Amino acid sequence: MLEKMSDFFENRLDGYDMHMLTNIESANEFYPFTAKCLPPQENCRILDLGCGTGLELEEYYSLNPSARVTGIDLSQGMLSALKNKFADKNITLILGSYFDTPFGESAFDAAVSVESLHHFTKEEKVPLYAKLHKSLKGNGYFILTDYFSLSDEEEFMHHQNLIAIKAEQGIKGNEFYHYDTPLTVKHETEALFTAGFSSVEVLNNWGATYTLKAIK
């Protein structure tokens, strides 16, 4: 049965960190790698989309303890766990959808998202990325670490499966349910360019998990 996005993560808070770090291939490598891609300067401002319990922040705060992070997530439990981890850090937490939350303009030095955005279509991502683009300072950038479909056929299959499951369960409307529908790297890159980013570079990959850097 499909679960609403917020319910899915709220119901899996216990053991979430251990699951992410041990059940996802190369997670012990791509979380630290992602952190090292973020700005090192003191008091820089970072926007974290789908911050969860802050696995990408554990390494980042060790590198840049003065960073000012704004994290957005649908799960209050996840945000509470993150706040407890980093009680001494300058962190602002927002309970809600990053699709609905205002980001401001020219507010952040960089943005990051890890293992969160593979649930959405290219058409859904373009306006989100356009809003993100506006929120970055002139030399800002977005680091995206996520897993991707390795072919157009795989991407299409994921979306068709979700449509079929929603039909079976009588789910209508635009509310987000938890089901993985990763884009290909090519389509993700196209979404970022359409949103206004000037360049997109693959920094690393671990199988189907890639880290992309999109520069404003």
Image: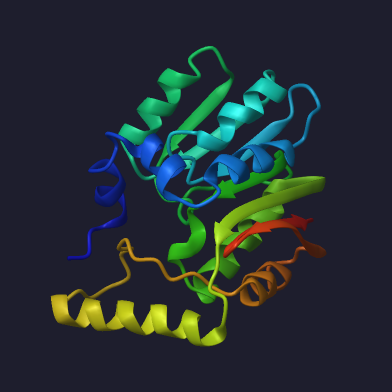
Q: How is the image coloured?
A: rainbow
Residue 104 lies, in percent from the top left, at 63, 45
Classify 102 as above or below 32.
below
Q: Is residue 58 visible?
A: yes
In the rendered image, which quarter contains the N terminus? bottom left
Q: Nearer the viewer, residue 105 or 172?
A: 172
Classify 161 as above or below 23.
below
Residue 54 lies, in percent from the top left, at 50, 33
Q: Residue at x 45, y 51 (%)?
A: 24
In the rendered image, which quarter contains the C terminus? bottom right
Residue 77 lies, in percent from the top left, at 31, 33
132 relative position to 175: left or right: right
Q: Residue at x 15, y 75 (%)?
A: 169
Outermost residue on the bottom side: it is 153
Quadrant assignment, res 36 = top right
Classify 1 as above or below 78.
below
Q: Is residue 68 visible?
A: no
Q: Residue at x 48, y 81 (%)?
A: 154
Residue 119 lies, in percent from the top left, at 43, 64
Q: Nearer the viewer, residue 133 or 120?
A: 120
139 relative position to 74: left or right: right
Q: Nearer the viewer, residue 152 or 168?
A: 152
90 relative position to 181: left or right: right
Classify 83 as above or below 202.
above
Quadrant assignment, res 70 = top right
87 relative position to 35: left or right: left
